[in-house]
Amino acid sequence: RMSVFLRKDAKDGTYSYDFRIGSRRFSGSTGKTTKREAQQVERAKKEEARAMAKAEADLFSENMTVQAACARYWQEVGQHHKNAETTLWSLGWLQEHFGGSKPLKDIGPSEVAAMVAKRRGEFVPSQRVQGRKYKTPEVRRRVGNATVNRSVIQPLREIHRRADRIWKAKTTEIDWSEYLLPEPQERVREATPHEEGAMMEELDRGYDVALEFAFINGCRRMEIIGLEWTRVDFFNRAFTVIGKGNKARTIPMTQRSFEILWGEQGNHPDRVFTYTAKKTVRMRDGRLLERGKRYPLTDAGLKSLAKRAIARSGVKNFRFHDTRHTAATRVLRQSNLRVAQLLLGHADVKTTTKYAHALMDDVLSGLESAAAAKDATGNATDKVGGRPKNMIRKG
């Protein structure tokens, strides 16, 4: 469309203008009957509109409220998060705590400290079904440091930084490192071969091969549950799992992985890992499970059955996720951090460094082997002085 134009219904022969500045539309009559004069009017209208838009933007940036900031963050970033519902909950909590009309610039170190204190005092939501009777009283616990960090501190930090750097809104300087709470380092629990065997013996058919598959390949529980036949390539001896963030990674099959997967064929048309129903039962979602038939493993089923098997086996302080730690540690002992990183699907090798204790074990083993080799050459040590015999002074 031309910048200025004659309307079909314009009886006085005057030109009109119609343009946009940002998301706003401006239109009207120039009052001029010549195109050149109309264009001059239009230029003046545009300058006027730009000045108005800038004044409104400055006013908005100067007084951006918590509600406006949360809404804009959700529109631009939050709704695209994998856990968008969690992000939405955090934004709602922040608005309720600060008040939606509170200017973002009025949130400073003191307000952040008060926010953290309030969140730390809250309790973990009850998982019990209302109205159902339980044998033991419920023990309520407060939210942990990691929950406080992820549910309120980090979301507010992201909003604050975006407002400052992108939206150019007025904010107060905050050192966020002062408020992030310390979190315990993720432990690395490695199962011994004896512990692994003991747990396997306590699991039913279907669940046992899923656990063994996890020990071999370091797959997460949901990666095993979601493994489908379309992503299993026997010809090239590889399979593909879908991990966190919906990211796919391909893992080559060991001989044992090949045997496990080959043996699971024919149990289900889509899913790889299945179990045999022990009895006919109607599920809460309306599905009917028939005794003797095979059905895909579920996350809740694998989690609970593995937990019970671990308890019966006598293995202490072990969780299903520790199968991943076990696989990573074993692989690292035979290779390097880069190989372990590829196996686990870590985007950053720094995440894999928590398994570095395996490398330190190798260093210790190497030092001990070197010491043993040195002693074997006949360079024995003097039991009294603690020095090699060839270093003992004569006379």
Image (cartoon, grey):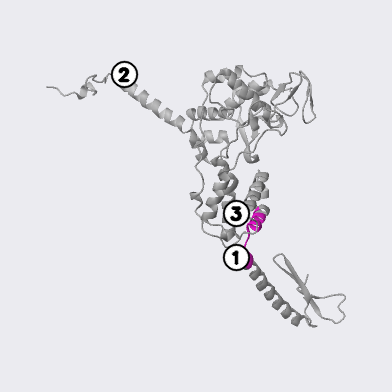
Res. 4 image quadrant: bottom right
Residue 17 showing in the rendered view: no
Segment tinted magenta in the rendering: 59-73
Which amino acid, mark 2?
A: Ala
Instruction: Quote the CA–CA distance across marks 1 and 3.
Output: 15 Å
Residue 322: image location, x then y, percent = 56, 28
Residue 243 magenta = no
Q: Secondary structure at mark 1?
A: helix
Residue at the (61%, 64%) spot, across then down: 63
Q: Characterize the local packing of mark 1: few (<14), some (14-19) or many (20 or more) Cα atoms within 10 angstroms.
A: some
What residue did someone put label 1 on?
A: 62
For marks 1 and 2 on the same chain, the one whose residue lies earlier in the sequence:
1
Is the C-beta separation of discs 1 and 2 under 8 Å? no
For marks 3 and 2 on the same chain, the one whose residue lies earlier in the sequence:
3
> Position of 317 compared to 101: left or right?
left
Is the C-beta separation of discs 3 and 2 under 8 Å? no
Q: Secondary structure at mark 3?
A: helix
Q: Characterize the local packing of mark 3: few (<14), some (14-19) or many (20 or more) Cα atoms within 10 angstroms.
A: many
Res. 146 image quadrant: top right
Disc 1 vs disc 2: which is toward the camera? 1
Residue 65 magenta = yes
Q: Secondary structure at mark 2?
A: helix
Residue at the (62%, 22%) spot, across then down: 308
> Position of 282 compared to 21: left or right?
right
Residue 248: image location, x then y, percent = 64, 37
Residue 180 showing in the rendered view: yes
Residue 340: image location, x then y, percent = 53, 33
Instruction: Quote the CA–CA distance across marks 3 and 2.
Output: 65 Å
What residue did someone put label 3 on?
A: 159
- Say if 192 sits above or below 179 in the image: above
Magenta residues, dominant SS class: helix
Mark drawn on residue 376: 2
